[in-house]
Amino acid sequence: MTLDNEAKERIRTTIRTMRQSLRTLDSAFQEFVTTVLGAIDSDSDSETGLSLTWHGPYSFGQSNDAPRFRDSEYRDTGGLYLWTYRFGDEYRVNYVGKTKAFHNRFTAELRYSRNGKSEKGRFACDALIDWGRFLSEGVRVVVNERPTKEELSQARPEIDRTLDACRVFVSVMGSKRQSWTEFALTKLLWESFGEIMHHPANGNMPRVLRNGPPADLPSGLVINSTFESGAKVRGLREAVRCSV
């Protein structure tokens, strides 16, 4: 079959339109699933109280103690997530985040942690820390605040080992209350256990706290966390009140 240039362009235009429609549909479906599952997990919410159900722990690779998140039923949903590491019989939170699509966010964050990124001719990546001390004691000690691409590459084996040890918990939630919860949990954990929390350098608080509380954050917000697996997560075993 031979097509003239005009016919070829019509076909390309049709394919581009179909691809965009599928992306829109996929995004709408993800939001629908997130809303439905979030409603199931938080059916006792009130204006000043949130009940979170945390699913996990999940791993990012092959593991004997936790299933891979990419195989989870929650991979295409969104909400709040906790990056944690296990010390003894409890998990300690390294980072609190929010996203519309867990799998996409985790893929991007893992890629950045391992490889950094170059923008406008400048290389950027996370600060390098004493990974051995981090995994054994849960303390973040920065050893190189602005590593080069070569220095990051040299540290890759230790970074991979640290990411392999990471365990993630997710709580499905619609976008309306994600900012509330991210701020409240980050504030609580940073003030209580800041030594393990992810931050740019020693002494610098997380960005979400530097930006201040969301304008619509209820005064005296109470967050109750239930961990589906029965896991013990430091600082989140009981209902916690966020004082702004």
Image (spheres, rainbow, N blue to C red):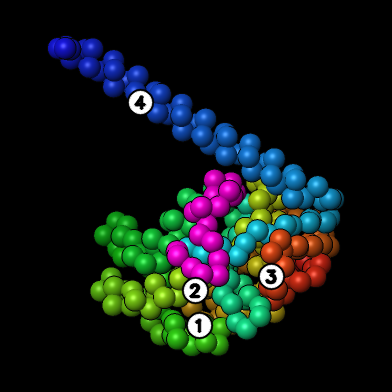
In the rendered image, residue 206, in percent from the top left (x then y), is placed at 57, 69
Q: Which residue is mark 3?
A: 231
Secondary structure found at label 4:
helix
How crowded is the residue under tag 2: few (<14 C-alpha within 10 Å), some, or many (20+)? Answer: some
Q: Residues within 10 Å of mark 3 (few under 14, many from 20)?
A: some
Identity of the residue drawn at 53% across and 36% down: 27
Mark seen at residue 165: 2
The mark nearer the N terminus, 3 or 4, is 4
Q: Which residue is mark 4?
A: 16
> Is residue 2 shown left or right of residue 85?
left
Which one is in front in this view, the residue at disc 2 or the one at disc 1?
Answer: 2
| Tag 1 residue | 135
Label 3, label 4: how many angstroms apart (C-alpha)?
A: 46 Å
Q: Amino acid at mark 3?
A: Ala
- Say if 70 sits above or below 116 in the image: above
| Label 2, label 3: how far apart the Cα atoms are | 16 Å
Q: Nearer the viewer, residue 89 or 171?
A: 89
Q: Residues at badges 4 and 1 in contact (C-beta under 8 Å)?
A: no
Depth check: give the residue in front, 221 or 86: 86
Where in the figure is residue 51, as x and y percent of width and height? 78, 56
Q: Look at the image and give the residue range highlighted in magenta.
A: 61-78
Q: Decide whether residue 71 is among the magenta residues.
A: yes
Q: Amino acid at mark 2?
A: Ala
Alpha carbons under labels 2 and 1: distance apart: 8 Å
Check disc 4 and give the amino acid type: Arg
Looking at this rendering, what residue extends furthest in the front direction? 64
